[in-house]
Image (cartoon, coloured by chain):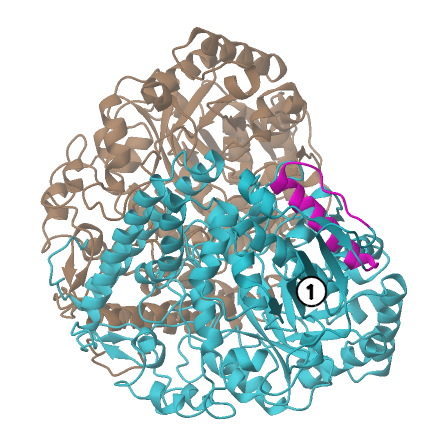
Chain colours: A brown, B cyan
């Protein structure tokens, strides 16, 4: 575990030019006590001292000089929204030469300070004042897939900085981590993998609770709740109970006792995240119970203490027979959970992956967001680039998440966007929001590729303020992390914003997904998942490719509200980036671009490589304009990305050329 | 490590019926002293006591009654053959009512006793007397791929019974193992994997030599030499020498010292097995030296003590680009070693895999056997069923090895069979023979599948007596291991003999190989190795499949003597079981059977499954006719084999149907 050398990412404020220093010379005054308010004051001093190049000291009471007044005001006026959001509102205003940062709560004040500092550093404060802000998402959760052996499932940034060899560590890096998370608005963190193995099952016991408490207290000072992933079979594994049936009295009692003890040790504990009946994990199905039975049992144990259960909807048959063309994994989440709408307790939240499959480069939005109406929902996205380049290849994901959030589910008629569903606006939930599977590790730069930090930063910023554009976020991150000179931003911002498109071009075509090396999920293997048990098929033959998910096929389209059901079900209307997800299409099918499908495949794969070459060239112009460390790290990643893109291009093109025998119109090299 | 429960395999002699007991009631007399002769006497008593159901005691001198006289006679008349074989001759004869077992050496006497006991048990003694026997192969070597962590590379029978957690163990099982090996004629054993990792590098040092010595002494009592696989980079890893250049004086001196010390500890030490410059192993290429330089350097260190170097020819580029259609892995061994013919010292032996690729279900014979003439050679086969069913699927390999041994290389004109080359008959070597990568582990039955023991037994028997037919060996093994009733032999013997053919039917078609799950090598993955770096391609497209290895293709055929070069190079003459190994062939090509290639693929894959179903049915008739343990073990394996065969059938058929779109003539179910 590397706890010695690490960057401060976007919090590495540089000293400002003298002219700008003068403009922000105020005395800071913290008007309110409390542990999170104290953190706010501290954060102000730390950050401003960096910018000013001299120590900044906090004053305890109002003064004559113009000051920066930090205060909590429960009476602060807020927009018309749920309490969960109202509570998180802050305001920054100028009154008689002084700056006032007012939070409706201590947590809101801390967010106000982070915002204030950022705006000062970016030189954006003046234009924005007065600035009143309420977050978009009530809950903004980080999911760590860290295992206690020190590895990180789908981690591409080194080892865990929480665990090593089944021990849990607390150190300066843990503190920096908490600060980084708070700085982008995170208010909940699940510190262990959803796949809860044997040793991790003990996290909810005295074996580890002492260390968990230290984390919870640290997080608490930053306004962040700590959650644990739990093993649904814990009563059997820890409690010597023969079952883990959620309706069994002994099981219920066991969880009640376990939860009671957790709250005795950690009064501010957030709750549980649960992956049940999925990919080999235990769950209520074993006992013929529903997921509502399972989730509610845990929820009732947590309710007396204000704890909540986050229950994942990633439930599907992972033992499918490839010969079976009727079963469709895409249907699974909706099929399992739709009938349970309204049956979950108030402190249960369903955590729903953005798409119906699993974090592919391109998927349609999960139809559950348009289906469920009486259930708390969290949108789950993957900041870790499992299928999107593993932090070797550049793939800035904010544009993808923007598309998802702005997708209109038509759940309550036009305008029922995913954003409005998971923010609670449509159905009035306050337990809802967004969760991201985090991409951090103990690498010096936290995220393997320096540019991958833009996804982490962006996730937090988008969760706070979904109105930000992908470009605005990219620009903010670049200026905070790499430098604000035009030389830098004019290279980096467009590079980030175009990178998902580039990655998609050299990957599996038109939404079909899954053409990756099995298990590793990096690099191409066109048939790698084609004859496997995971429900992940492209069905390519000599005539065409794609999965028929229309009413005539697996019927998946019928899980969508109109007009999507009709649009997706109609070959001519289906958005072409999802064409092969919904339809089996001949290679000679003419796309709206006037190209055949096969020519589109060839063209995009040649283009993808060219675009990577361009990105690499552009990056190389930054040498000596940004830190050597960041420059070299990313330069090395671009080398590998280029190799990967070429491998994708050649394998995909050869695969389809061998299948259909159709020549590239432009006569480029396709290996026979 | 399981050292408590294990069978005696083919040495589990049952008590004979009274009538047959009387016929073998003789007093055993050991006429010669010596450690191997003592083992022979002991073996006689142990085995006969089992058959007679009462203790058998050895007498020290001639007696009046008819006896079984065991003796060593250096003057024993032998056929015209190399000294290495003459020395191993034994004779069994009847003289005035007594049986005389005479060995030209102690080792030969021990083999005579094993043969005598076996013939008594099988009731074959009378018909064979007088019986004079000289082995076919001078060296009959077992190669263990056991690693010191306790795992076995490509092992399918549990863990190692030599090692666990980097310790080496000696116990009753080790002793039973040595006896089993000697009973089938083994006279050399390499106790560690050819891939010599960090810890195993220390086997030649005092860290482990004490235990190695115990093994060597045990093996020595059974007439078996112990060999070690060594790390060519040992001087660097152990000796602090900056290079392992075979021409470097410090390196030479280091090996001389190391070898000297080994022989001080273990005077009967056999020598080294070396995998160099292969699949990431270090070797002489690093220093611009030849493999002759490397092998001879080690050979010269060993020569003063009578030790030998076995040097593997499995050298190829394992970082090939799939786009490259010129490089041909099949060419590699010949290309690397042919030019070195005559350049190796007398105590160097090249160990050559049977085929040019790597133990596939079907390969042509390596052209090196027809090329090398002034070099000691060992044929390497794989008893462990890496690509041939992993001891789950039944695949009796003796028929394959018989084909290989009887292949006429035309190296010295017609009749230069592989058997005559590696037995030393053609070129007069005495250091030559056959090596088998062993299939044992710590499973109760030693070989995972009880029937896989027939491969182990058969390897030894064939190495001793290549004139035995596959059926004779199958019959011997069945009667020794499962029982001699007709009910049993009439089921098991044909099942064994047909099983390779069955396995081949549902595997990759017509010699192309490699359609297996990468790394694991069990189960189908048609494109699994198609775009990989291992030089293993089938080049299937919508028109046809196969690799052109003719003069117009990679030129591999030119490594063969005539007439093979012409035969393999001619699509019309090429043996059809190797058609796709040598030619790229359209699916519509008409085979000699009058079937198209694609119809042949479909037919054989349907037939393969049917044949497994038949084997399974036949096996089930044996319930209660053989031991429950063996019955259940094999029955369970047949379940898995049937599932595997079905998966192969459906994936192969679907793959090719999707590629070419040609319907099965018989309208059977091919999944689209």
Which region shows up in magenta? B32-59
Q: On the rendered structure, is A507 left or right of A629?
A: left
Quarter of the rendering occupied by the N terminus of chain A: top right
Quarter of the rendering occupied by the C terminus of chain A: bottom left
- SS of the residue at dot 1? strand
Residue A414 lies in what quarter of the image? top left
Residue A342, above or below B257? above
Q: Residue at the location (56% across, 82% down)?
A: B421
Asked whether residue B240 is drawn in magenta, I would say no
Residue B164, above or below A196? below
Residue B435, above or below B386? below
| Residue that badge 1 annotates | B188
Q: On the rendered structure, is B633 left or right of A506?
A: right
Q: Chain of mark 1?
A: B
Q: Which x, y percent locates residue B235?
A: 81, 71
Asked whether residue B40 is drawn in magenta, I would say yes
Asked whether B634 or B568 is in front, the reply is B634
Q: Residue at the location (88% across, 70% down)?
A: B260
Q: On the rendered structure, is A638 left or right of B435?
A: left
């Amino acid at each position: 575990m590397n706890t010695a050398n690490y960057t401060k990412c976007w919090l590495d404020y540089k000293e400002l030019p003298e002219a700008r220093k003068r403009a922000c010379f105020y005395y800071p005054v913290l008007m309110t006590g409390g542990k999170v308010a104290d953190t706010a004051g501290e954060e102000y001093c730390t950050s401003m001292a960096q910018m000013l190049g001299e120590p900044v000291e906090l004053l305890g009471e109002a003064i004559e000089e113009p000051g920066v007044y930090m205060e909590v005001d429960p009476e602060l006026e807020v927009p018309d929204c749920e309490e969960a959001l109202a509570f998180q509102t802050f305001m920054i205003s100028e009154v008689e030469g002084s700056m006032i940062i007012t939070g409706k709560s201590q947590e809101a004040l801390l967010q106000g300070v982070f915002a204030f500092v950022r705006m000062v550093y970016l030189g954006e404060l003046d234009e924005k004042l007065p600035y009143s802000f309420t977050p978009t998402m009530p809950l903004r959760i980080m999911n760590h897939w860290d295992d206690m052996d020190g590895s990180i499932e789908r981690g591409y940034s080194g080892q865990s900085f929480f665990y090593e060899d089944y021990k849990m560590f607390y150190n300066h890096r843990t503190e920096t981590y908490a600060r980084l998370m708070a700085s982008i608005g995170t208010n909940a963190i699940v510190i262990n993998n959803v796949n809860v193995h044997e040793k991790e099952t003990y996290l909810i016991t005295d074996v580890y609770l002492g260390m968990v408490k230290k984390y919870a207290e640290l997080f608490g000072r930053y306004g962040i709740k700590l959650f644990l992933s739990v093993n649904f079979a814990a009563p059997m594994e820890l409690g010597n109970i023969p079952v883990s049936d959620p309706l069994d009295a002994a099981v219920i009692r066991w969880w009640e006792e376990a939860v009671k003890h957790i709250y005795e040790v950690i009064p501010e504990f957030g709750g549980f995240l649960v992956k049940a009946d999925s990919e080999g994990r235990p769950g209520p199905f074993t006992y013929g119970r529903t997921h509502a039975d399972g989730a509610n049992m845990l929820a009732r144990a947590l309710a007396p203490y204000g704890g909540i259960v986050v229950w994942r909807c990633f439930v599907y048959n992972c033992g499918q027979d490839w010969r079976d063309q009727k079963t469709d994994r895409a249907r699974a989440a909706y099929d399992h959970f739709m009938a349970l709408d309204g049956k979950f307790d108030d402190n249960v939240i369903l955590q729903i992956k953005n798409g119906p499959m699993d974090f592919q480069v391109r998927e349609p939005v999960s139809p559950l967001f348009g289906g469920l109406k009486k259930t708390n929902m969290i949108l789950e996205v993957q900041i870790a680039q499992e299928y999107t380049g593993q932090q070797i290849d550049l793939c800035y994901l904010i544009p993808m998440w923007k598309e998802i959030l702005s997708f209109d589910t038509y759940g309550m008629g036009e305008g029922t966007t995913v954003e409005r569903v998971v923010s609670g606006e449509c159905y009035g939930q306050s337990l809802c929001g967004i969760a991201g599977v985090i991409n951090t590790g103990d690498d010096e730069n936290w995220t393997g590729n320096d540019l991958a930090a833009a996804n982490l930063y962006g996730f937090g910023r988008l969760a706070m303020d979904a109105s930000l554009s992908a470009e605005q976020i990219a620009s903010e991150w670049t200026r905070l992390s790499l430098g604000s000179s035009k030389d830098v931003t004019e290279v980096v911002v467009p590079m980030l914003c175009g990178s998902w498109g580039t990655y998609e071009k050299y990957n599996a075509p038109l939404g079909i997904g899954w053409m990756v090396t099995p298990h590793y999920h990096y690099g191409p293997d066109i048939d790698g998942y084609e004859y496997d048990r995971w429900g992940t098929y492209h069905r390519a033959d000599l005539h065409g490719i794609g999965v028929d998910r229309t009413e005539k096929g697996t019927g998946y389209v019928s899980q969508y509200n109109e007009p999507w059901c009709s649009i997706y079900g109609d070959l001519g209307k289906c958005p072409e980036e999802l064409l092969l997800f919904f339809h089996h299409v001949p290679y000679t099918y003419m796309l709206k671009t006037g190209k055949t499908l096969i020519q589109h495949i060839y063209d995009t794969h040649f283009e993808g490589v060219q675009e990577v070459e361009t990105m690499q060239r552009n990056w190389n112009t930054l040498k000596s304009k940004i830190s050597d460390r960041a420059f070299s790290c990313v330069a090395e990643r671009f080398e590998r990305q280029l190799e990967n893109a070429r491998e994708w291009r050649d394998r995909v093109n050869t695969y389809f050329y061998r299948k259909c025998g159709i020549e590239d119109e432009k006569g480029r090299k396709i290996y026979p």
